[in-house]
Image (cartoon, rainbow, N blue to C red):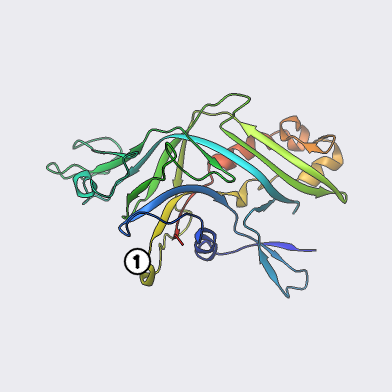
């Protein structure tokens, strides 16, 4: 039976973004996009081979979940430009959907030192935007390009949504007792969401520095079900199935907090990627 393992972010980050985004835009820009990924490797029981599984995540008991669909909605996206960069430097390369504003000296959260003459710039995309399976970032049907500089984070918020159109929604299938089942999960939130480097930010190798590139946020699915014993709770009755559908919100006992923990892990899973546009 395959065994889970975690690959390096450097390998999967580059492999997952190759071909992720369409061409277009000058080489001194990034195409801004969002997605999701997993660093999971499926390793043969005799360790003779392994397979990348970018849409697979697993629980504490090594129950594997393969994502079918995922949708998430964000608004109020903000990115700080480097301390030496200002909005006026990038007027010609910034997409019209993305605004840029120079902050005033002493603006809270901008760091201990700011140039009083040339305050730091920040990019802003109001949104809302709907992202996920088969959904690239676009505004008014247009892709969004940003200056090709270093960004330490993307700060945003969840769109509160409704029960019919929640902030986040996923459907993933799994096998339990040799039968096919489905996990369905969603939540509504208006809380902040941050995408930042989970590990050492390496960017693209120098040999690709002049190639068209993409940058953006990615939900790292690797730890979503960390600490949750899915098969154990199904066996004891602490989790139950509605037909073939598992909903963690019905958990009790050892899995009473399963839904809360999954939501928390999702909201902490924001990563950044940089990759090539083919």
Q: Which of 250 and 182 is in front in this view?
A: 182
Quarter of the image where the N terminus is located: bottom right
Q: Which image quarter: residue 29? A: bottom left
Q: Residues within 10 Å of mark 1 (few under 14, many from 20)?
A: some
Residue 17 x, y percent position in the rendering = 50, 58
Residue lying at the far bottom of the rendered structure: 48
Q: Residue at 85% across / 35% down in the picture? A: 243
Tell me where residue 49 sits by quadrant: bottom right
- Residue 94: % across, % down: 29, 46
Residue 255: in sight, yes or no?
yes
The residue under label 1 is 209
Residue appearing at x 74%, y 54% in the figure: 62
> Total number of numbered labels?
1
Rendered view: 62 above or below 170 = below
**Observer-nearest of 193 and 204:** 204
Q: Can residue 59 be seen in this view?
A: no
Tell me which residue sits at (35%, 66%) in the image: 209
Q: Give coordinates of residue 42: x percent, y percent.
A: 70, 63
Q: In this view, does 40 lie to the left or right of 105?
A: right
Looking at the rendered structure, the secondary structure element under dot 1 is loop
Q: Is residue 1 left or right of residue 86?
A: right
């Amino acid at each position: 039976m395959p065994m889970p393992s975690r690959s390096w972010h450097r390998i999967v980050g580059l492999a997952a973004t190759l071909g992720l985004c369409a061409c277009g835009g000058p080489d001194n820009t990034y195409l801004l996009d969002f997605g999701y990924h997993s660093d999971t490797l499926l390793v043969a029981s005799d360790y003779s081979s392994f397979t990348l599984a970018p849409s697979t995540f697993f629980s504490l008991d090594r129950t594997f979940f393969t994502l079918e669909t995922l949708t998430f909605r964000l608004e109020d996206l903000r990115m700080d430009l480097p301390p030496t960069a200002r909005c006026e430097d990038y007027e010609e390369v910034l997409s019209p959907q993305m605004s840029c504003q120079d902050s005033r000296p002493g603006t809270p959260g901008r760091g201990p030192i700011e140039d009083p003459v040339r305050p730091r710039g920040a990019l802003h995309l109001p949104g809302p935007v709907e992202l996920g399976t088969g959904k690239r970032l676009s505004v008014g049907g247009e892709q969004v390009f940003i200056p090709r500089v270093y960004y330490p984070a993307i700060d945003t918020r969840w769109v509160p949504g409704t029960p019919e159109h929640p902030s986040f929604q996923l459907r993933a299938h799994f096998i339990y007792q040799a039968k096919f089942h489905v996990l369905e999960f969603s939540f509504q939130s208006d809380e902040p969401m941050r995408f930042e480097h989970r590990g050492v930010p390496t960017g693209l190798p120098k040999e690709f520095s002049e190639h068209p590139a993409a940058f953006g946020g990615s939900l790292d699915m690797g730890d979503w079900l960390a600490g949750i014993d899915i098969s154990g709770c199904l066996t004891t009755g602490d989790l139950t199935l509605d037909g073939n559908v598992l909903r963690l919100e019905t958990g009790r006992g050892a899995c009473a907090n399963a839904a809360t923990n999954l939501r928390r892990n999702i909201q902490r899973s924001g990563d950044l990627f940089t990759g090539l546009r083919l």
